[in-house]
C-alpha cells in the first residue's frame, strides 16, 4: 500500500486552515470526484475516498489535534479503538446530496444538493427507451350455470390498448422522431422554486420520460397506443363459480417499445340455475312427487347434471326426505372429487280433484286412523303434555 498522503495536502489547505476553509475545500473535491458524477472511474473513486477520509479527520477538532501531533498513527488506532484508517468506501453508498447537504445542517428545508445535479444515483430517471410492459386488464363475464358444470368456450370481441399501427408505438408522426425533452433536457426532472430552496419535480412536459415527440402521430395523439379490437377465445373450465378468475396470458394491453403485453383477467359471474342450487361442489335439487307415491313407495326420477337417475323410494317416505347421490354434483375446478347431489323429496297436495277422485279420497279417509299418522300422533301427545302443565299451574294460582 502506498504511503498515505498528508491530509492537508489531500484537501489542498494549509495546516492553519479554518474549519470553514476545510469544509469548502472538501466540498469542491467531493463535487469533483463523487462516484455518481464519475461512473466507472476508479481513479475518481480513490480520490473521493482519500478526500473523505481527510475530511472526516480534519473536520473533527479532536481528531485533527491528534493528527497534528502524531500524524496518521494518531488517528489510526488498533482493534477495539477508533479505526480511522478503515475502508472509506462506505461513502460511496451515500448519496451525493446527503454528503453535501450535510454542510447545511441536514434536511428539513426541502433542499438537497442532489437536485442541482440532476439527482444522485438512487433517483436517476428511468431509461425512457426501456421496454414498458403492457397493463393487465380485468373484465367481468356472465355465464350460464350449465357452462360452469360442463365447461365451455366463448369467443369475445374486446378492445384493448395496443401498439399504434401508424407510428409503431413511437407516438411520432411519420418522418418525425422522439427528441430530447426541451424542458428537462432529458433528465425527466426539473428544478423548481427559487434562490436557496429549490425543489425537484417530475418534468411536466415529458412526464419524466426525458423525451418528447416532435410531431405527434395523429392516430394515437402521440401516446403510441390505440384501442384495438381483438377477438379472443376463452376456455371456461368445468367447475368454475362466481368470482372465479381466468387468466389469458398476454391478452391484456400491448407493451411499449417491445415490452411484453399484459394479461387479461376474466372474472366470472355464474347465473343461477332454475333447477339446481349450488354450495361449493354440492348441488341441491327439490323433487316434487305425489303423496300417493310417497305412501305406496315406488321409483322416482332425480335430475342430475349428467341425466336422470331413477331411485326407488320406500313406502311411507316422509315429506322433505333427503337423498344423497354421491359424485353426481359439480366437478371440482381444482381437480378434486366431484361433489354430491342432494335431492329433497317433497310431495304435492293434488288440486282440482274430479268428483270421482274426491269420492275415492273420502272413502280412503274413512279407513285412516291415528295409527296411519305416527307424526300426528306424537304431535298430539306433545300438545296433551303442554295443556296438562298449563292446567296444573292455573289450579295452583
Ligand atoms: Zn401512433
Ligand atoms: Zn422533460
Image (cartoon, rainbow, N blue to C red):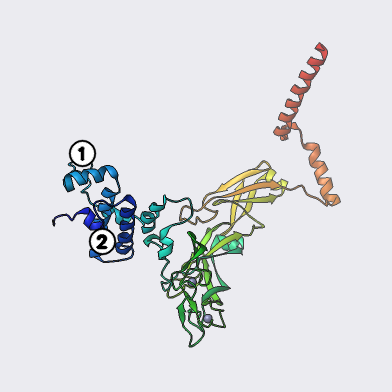
Relative to 62, is 13 above or below? Answer: below
User: Looking at the picture, how far across and down is residue 12, in whole percent?
Assistant: 25, 59
Q: Secondary structure at mark 2?
A: helix
In the image, residue 115 sits, relative to residue 178, either above or below, namely: above
In the rendered structure, the answer to whether residue 179 lies left or right of residue 352 reads left
Using a 10 Å C-alpha cutoff, classify the residue at mark 2 as few (fewer than 14 neighbours), some (14 to 19) or many (20 or more): many
Query: Which residue extends farthest top?
Result: 396
Which sits in the foreground, 193 or 294? 193
The reply to whether the C-beta atoms of the residues labelled 1 and 2 are less than 8 Å apart is: no
List x then y, in percent, for residue 291. 72, 46
Residue furthest to the bottom: 175
Q: Residue at 83% across / 42% down in the picture?
A: 362
The residue under the point 42% across, 64% down is 116
Q: Is mark 1 within 8 Å of ligand 2?
A: no
Q: Nearer the viewer, residue 188 or 285?
A: 188
Mark on residue 146? none
Location of residue 304 in the rendering, given as x and y in whole percent from the top left corner: 59, 56
Q: Residue at x 54, y 52 (%)?
A: 281
Residue 33 is left or right of residue 348, and the answer is: left
Q: Is residue 164 above or below residue 125?
A: below
Q: Decide if residue 232 is in sight here.
A: yes
Which residue does the numbered mark 1 point to in the structure image?
80
Residue at mark 2: C-beta within 8 A of ligand 2: no
Query: Label 1 crowding class (10 Å Cα cut-off): few <14, some 14-19, many 20+?
Result: few
Badge 1 or badge 2: first in the primary sequence: 2
Q: Is residue 264 left or right of residue 377?
A: left
The residue labelled by disc 2 is 45
- Give the quarter of the image for residue 52: bottom left
The quarter of the image holding the C terminus is top right
Placement of 140 over or under 254, stated as above or below: above
Which residue is at a point 25% across and 53% down the rendered structure image?
54
Amino acid at each position: 500500500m502506498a504511503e498515505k498522503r498528508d491530509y492537508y495536502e489531500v484537501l489542498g489547505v494549509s495546516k492553519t486552515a479554518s474549519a470553514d476553509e476545510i469544509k469548502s475545500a472538501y466540498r469542491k473535491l467531493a463535487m469533483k470526484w463523487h462516484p455518481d458524477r464519475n461512473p466507472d472511474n476508479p481513479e475518481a473513486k480513490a480520490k473521493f475516498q482519500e478526500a473523505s477520509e481527510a475530511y472526516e479527520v480534519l473536520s473533527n477538532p479532536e481528531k485533527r489535534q491528534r493528527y497534528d501531533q502524531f500524524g496518521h498513527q494518531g488517528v489510526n488506532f488498533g482493534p477495539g479503538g477508533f479505526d480511522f484508517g478503515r475502508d472509506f468506501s462506505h461513502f460511496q453508498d451515500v448519496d451525493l446530496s446527503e454528503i453535501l447537504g450535510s454542510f447545511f445542517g441536514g434536511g428539513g428545508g426541502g433542499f438537497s444538493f442532489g437536485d442541482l445535479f440532476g439527482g444522485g444515483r438512487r433517483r436517476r430517471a428511468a431509461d425512457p427507451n426501456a421496454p414498458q410492459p403492457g397493463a393487465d386488464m380485468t373484465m367481468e363475464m356472465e355465464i350460464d350455470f350449465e357452462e360452469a358444470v360442463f365447461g365451455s368456450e366463448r369467443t369475445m370481441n374486446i378492445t384493448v390498448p395496443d401498439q399504434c399501427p401508424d407510428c409503431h408505438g413511437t407516438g411520432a408522426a411519420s418522418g418525425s422522431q422522439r427528441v430530447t425533452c426541451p424542458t428537462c433536457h432529458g433528465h425527466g426532472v426539473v428544478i423548481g422554486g427559487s434562490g436557496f430552496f429549490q425543489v425537484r419535480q417530475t418534468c411536466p412536459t415529458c412526464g419524466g420520460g426525458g423525451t418528447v415527440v416532435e410531431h405527434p402521430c395523429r392516430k394515437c395523439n402521440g401516446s403510441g397506443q390505440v384501442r384495438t379490437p381483438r377477438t379472443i377465445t376463452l376456455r371456461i373450465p368445468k367447475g368454475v363459480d362466481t368470482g372465479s378468475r381466468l387468466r389469458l396470458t398476454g391478452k391484456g394491453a400491448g407493451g411499449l417499445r417491445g415490452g411484453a403485453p399484459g394479461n387479461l383477467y376474466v372474472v366470472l359471474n355464474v347465473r343461477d340455475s332454475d333447477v339446481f342450487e349450488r354450495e361449493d361442489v354440492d348441488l341441491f335439487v327439490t323433487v316434487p312427487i305425489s303423496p300417493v307415491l310417497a305412501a305406496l313407495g315406488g321409483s322416482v326420477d332425480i335430475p342430475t347434471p349428467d341425466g336422470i337417475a331413477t331411485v326407488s323410494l320406500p313406502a311411507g317416505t316422509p315429506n322433505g326426505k333427503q337423498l344423497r347421490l354421491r359424485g353426481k354434483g359439480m366437478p371440482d375446478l381444482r381437480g378434486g372429487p366431484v361433489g354430491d347431489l342432494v335431492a329433497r323429496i317433497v310431495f304435492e297436495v293434488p288440486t282440482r280433484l274430479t268428483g270421482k277422485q274426491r269420492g275415492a279420497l273420502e272413502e280412503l279417509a274413512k279407513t285412516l286412523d291415528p295409527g296411519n299418522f305416527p307424526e300426528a300422533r306424537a304431535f298430539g301427545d306433545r300438545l296433551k303434555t303442554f295443556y296438562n302443565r298449563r292446567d296444573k299451574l292455573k289450579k295452583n294460582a
